[in-house]
Image (cartoon, grey):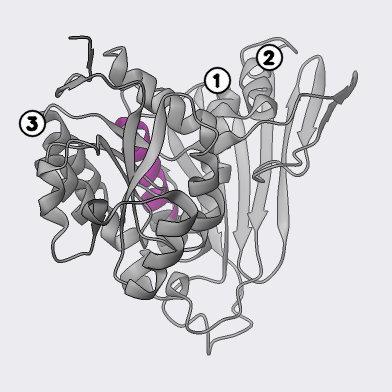
Amino acid sequence: MDSTSTGGSTLPNKSKLGVALVGLGKYASEQLAPALKLTQYCELKGIVTGSPEKIPRWKTDYGIRDQNIYNYDNFEEIASNEEIDIVYIVLPNSQHGNYTVRAANAGKHVICEKPMAISVHECEEMIEVCKRNNVKLGIGYRLHFDPYNQYVMQLGQGTMGKLQKVEGDHSMLLEDPSAWRLQKKLAGGGPLMDVGIYVVQASCYAVGKNPIAIKKARFGEVSRPDIYDTVEESISWTLEFPEGVLAHGTCSYAREGDWLKGKASRGSWELDPAYAYNGIQGKTTEGSINFKEVNQQALQMDEFARSIIEGRETKVPGEMGCRDVAILMAIYKAAETGTSVPLEFSEL
């Protein structure tokens, strides 16, 4: 009998690995589920939801079988389901750690949405539990599979000369007082934990190195104290990298913004928009950048499935997510204290 080795288990006669989405919010329903219709190495097999009224549509649209439908109380029963190999956590930030640990203890490989968790301690626990259960842990960093952002990674490695500076902004209007993103208990913070992490991530892969310090950070003024009472409305920061390279970032819930720029000794580049699901555009001092449109999420999930099948590390491992949460926490510390905060990381 042919079998597919997944590192933590052997899956007989499987051409694709089964994925269960945990949390059926907007991102899962509008991006991940449709993307799973395009994947080559994985497919949507199960759902985990606390909203029974959503189940009929998912059964109709994706052919989810009753035995592959779970809620948050019986989630552990997924351990005995051989159709499900990967659990994708798409819940509010404060639940990422809990459900990653529960999925790993159930013997399932895990993709966790960003930010990986709301504390470095949680991230470290997630990594340790996944290793102990011999399952893989990946983070939902879809832009590592976008050709425009991949090109930026190449530019940072010297194709335009020595990189001198990176700048970026990712902001969105959020004015719904009931949004979970405005509740620190659920989100862990404001726009920095949501959209700002994209700019932090982009700075790291544009430079191609880990930062050595938060040089400075500052909270923006609060225009709506009735909404922004537990999380920041906006924040700006400067990351310091080796060889004096600086990366300036901003994010806000009070306006729109979506761009990334870099300057090197022999030219400059810009993505605008930079972090969108599609429609990313770019240019350099030599002209426009043009790549074929891709489905970032489909490529991301396929790469994770292939890493399981091939017994190798994913491009976006838990250690990368843990590094980024450490950077976010240091940005908050720098903004709160008005001082620079040193950072120390092992290279990924």
Which residue in the structure is indicated by mark 3? 132
Closest to the observer: 136 or 241? 136
Disc nearer the start of the sequence (3/1): 3
The x and y percentages for residue 238 are 57, 44
**Do the numbered discs 2 and 1 sit on residues whose CB atoms are within 8 Å?**
yes
Q: Quadrant of residue 326?
A: top left
Q: Mark 3: few, some, or many residues within 10 Å (few <14, many ≥20)?
A: few
Dot 2: few (<14), some (14–19), or many (≥20) neighbours within 10 Å?
some
Does 40 sit left or right of 69 as displayed?
right
Which mark is in front, 3 or 1? 3
Magenta segment boundaries in residue numbering: 318-331
In the image, is residue 17 part of the stretch drawn in magenta? Answer: no
Q: Residue at point 42% right, 73% down?
A: 180
| Residue 23, horizontal then vertical, whole percent | 36, 60
| Coordinates of residue 66 in the picture (x, y in percent) | 26, 57
Question: Looking at the image, is mark 3 or mark 2 nearer the viewer?
Answer: 3
* Placement of 68 over or under 94, stated as above or below: above
Q: CA distance from mark 3 to mark 2?
A: 41 Å
Report which residue position mark 1 lands on: 243
Q: Is residue 40 left or right of residue 245?
A: left
Residue at x 56% of width, y 71% of height: 233
Circle 1 — which element?
helix
Q: Nearer the viewer, residue 210 or 95?
A: 95
Q: Secondary structure at mark 3?
A: helix
